[in-house]
Amino acid sequence: MKQHPRDILLGAQAAAGFLPVCDHYSGVEARMRKSLQLQAEMTEEFGTCVFDVSLDCEDGAPVGGEADHAALVVSLALAAGPNARVAVRVHPVDHPAFEADMATIAGQAGHKLSHIMVPKVESVEDVIYAEKALLRASAGHLPLQVLIESPAAVHRAFDIAAHPKVQSLSFGLMDFVSAHGGAIPSDGMSSAGQFTHPLVVRAKLAIASACHAHGKVPSHCVVTEFSDVLAMKHAATRAAHEFGYTRMWSIHPGQIRPILEALAPSDAEIENASKIIAAAVNADWAPVSFKGQLQDRASYRYFWQVLERARQTGRALPPEALVYF
């Protein structure tokens, strides 16, 4: 095979890799086990891992039981299958359990993890602190994903996204709203209000822009109305199409498929992208005319990303595109 389209079209951004579009969180033992089993079942169904499982220490560990919970998370990660994508959300860097979390989880299960999620990151200094903890745990290979949850952190989002250890920025909606001391009404945390309140909208756009400026993945916040499938689909669609998010959190198994559906390209988009990339390959990436329109490396990059997203969401690919995966 000639040089891969990812390397030709994406350059340095190719090194960041492509993440599943759904990041599913669970912190209770029974739900963590069910999440890992569901991931295995859906990987077999789609032929690729379509969502990450993030085992949660921050909200999952009982007060005083942080060490036991970290040990449980390690045992679950080590027992996961070879094709699993398992991450862990540790406690914030200023929490008394942070150092022990990193030493235990990254130190014992780092070879099985896809990344570490660090919540309540306020600055680049917090990222550097977490990076040093990874190094102390002999897990320096692990990327960090960070959760932006305050107005000050949003202000520093571009600097945080620029750090080479950071793979993705997530938006912590509920903490962000509560950080405003009542200035944002509670409706700002709802599936509808989070897309209309100006301060929330501004924060979402800032995080997405920071990620795209530095080749990182913007991950959209939760929808708390987890039993409302229509609200989930609507929120995921708006996050992707209007706000530039390419990944989204799930907090209930019923939210996973709506996220995949909303963030997946249509069959028509996939077919069109496959034909354009095939024409580009045949032309050795020189400009071509396709259906009366000029296509060159700028548009090739876009259509290649359509195919990447199709693969991430388990969509069927035409044979001429499937060969690259």
Image: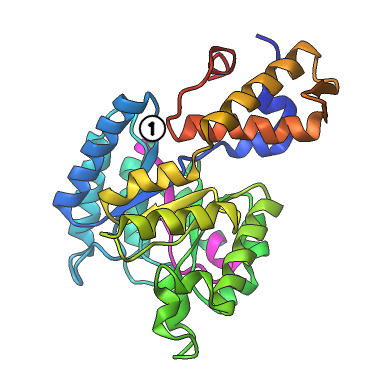
Residue 175 percent across, percent down from the top left: 42, 75
Whether the magenta-drawn stretch holds residue 122 is answered as: yes
Query: Which residue carries the number 1 mark?
Result: 49
| Relative depth, front residue between 98 and 276 | 276
Extreme-bottom residue of the structure: 182
Answer with left or right where residue 282 lies relative to residue 76. Answer: right
| Relative depth, front residue between 262 and 66 | 262
Residue 200, quarter of picture: bottom right
Q: Is residue 305 above or below residue 205?
A: above
| Relative depth, front residue between 250 and 264 | 264
Q: Is residue 8 above or below residue 157?
A: above
Q: At 51% from the left edge and 76% from the top edge, which residue is drawn?
A: 150
Extreme-top residue of the structure: 1
Magenta-drawn segment: 112-127
Tally of numbered discs: 1
Answer with left or right where residue 71 lies relative to residue 131. Answer: left
Answer with left or right where residue 288 lies relative to residue 180. Answer: right
Q: At 30% from the left edge and 60% from the top edge, which residue is drawn?
A: 228
Whether the magenta-drawn stretch holds residue 67 is answered as: no
